[in-house]
Image: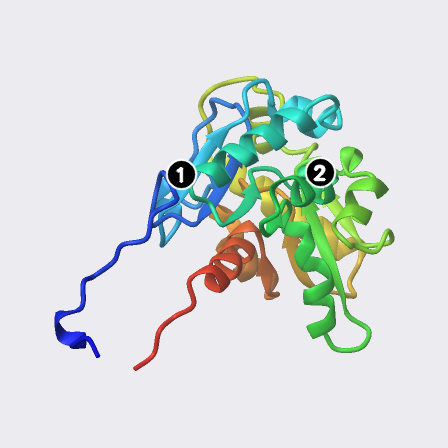
Amino acid sequence: MQDPVHSPRIARGGKSIYGAPLGILMLEARFPRIPGDMGNGTTWPFPVLFRVVRGASPEKVVLQGARGLLPDFIAAAQDLVDLGAEAITTNCGFLSLFQAELAAAVKVPVATSSLMQVPWVQAMLPPGKRVGVITVSRNSLTPAHLQAAGVPLDVPVEGTEGGREFFRVLIKAEKADLDVALAEQDILDAGRALLARHPEVGAIVLECTNMPPYAAALQAALGLPVYDIYTLVTWLHGGLRPARFG
């Protein structure tokens, strides 16, 4: 029997990049990505792989239903898996439309949208309470988006279209700079409007992957649990690299 103390140490290959098991498909945009934004590398407490899908602007994905972009997202996801990603997520909750196709194409776990958390959060709430959704564009969030993420079609939804900063910078690209205080106020206003229309809401799920920087302020203002792409992705990564104890 070989002495284990003197056994050779074998490093296993097969990937191009190691230590970053999570791949993120990014929209092509130029607005500021502040800490907490999905596209800011400092947001994540672990390394990630980014891939920008060229031509997939926020306006095309959110306002135009991502028409014609599925092959580009599949190719980018496959590229990330080839590099070493063991799971894939995306930079826009509206890409729930591609959930089934992406998962089938890359054959690794795929979480396209923070909306996938809605059924989980609903299961935790007491009777009479419901999950509410805040989205960047209420008018663009269709039954197809909700169904693809497993969300009930009657879920209460509020958008940021009427705000002064968040929607016009991130979706309409009317300017390159972002007034963070105004953007936060847009999220808070949407949350208060949601509760005014639906006082039965007992927890919030933020659809937009650019909203996590404002989640803490929203939770403090409403006094309700808030879930977003950060909570989804950290959960996803936790399964890829479970904590070791002892």
For badge 2, the amino acid type reads Phe
Nearer the observer, disc 1 or disc 2? 2
Q: Residues within 10 Å of mark 2 (few under 14, many from 20)?
A: many
Residue 187, disc: none
* Direction from residue 139 to residue 102 in the image, left or right: left
Q: Position of residue 208 (x, y in %)?
A: 61, 42
Q: Residues within 10 Å of mark 1 (few under 14, many from 20)?
A: few
User: Which residue lies most toward the left here?
Assistant: 6
Q: CA distance from mark 1 to mark 2?
A: 23 Å
For badge 1, the amino acid type reads Asn
Q: Position of residue 54 (x, y in %)?
A: 54, 20
Name the residue: 43% across, 43% down.
84
Please say if 109 is above or below 170.
Answer: below
Q: Position of residue 164 (x, y in %)?
A: 60, 30
Residue 164 visible in the picture: no
Q: Position of residue 149 (x, y in %)?
A: 74, 50
Name the residue: 65% across, 23% down.
59
Label 2: element kind: helix
Residue 98, disc: 2
Q: Which residue is mark 1?
A: 40
Q: How many marks?
A: 2
Task: Verify CB contact (< 8 Å) between mark 1 and mark 2.
Answer: no
Please say if 146 is above or below 50.
Answer: below
Kindly indicate the quadrant of the structure image that contains residue 35: top left
Closest to the observer, 148 or 154:
148
Name the residue: 62% across, 25% down.
72
Name the residue: 60% across, 22% down.
57
Label 1: element kind: loop
Q: Quick one: quadrant of the C terminus?
A: bottom left
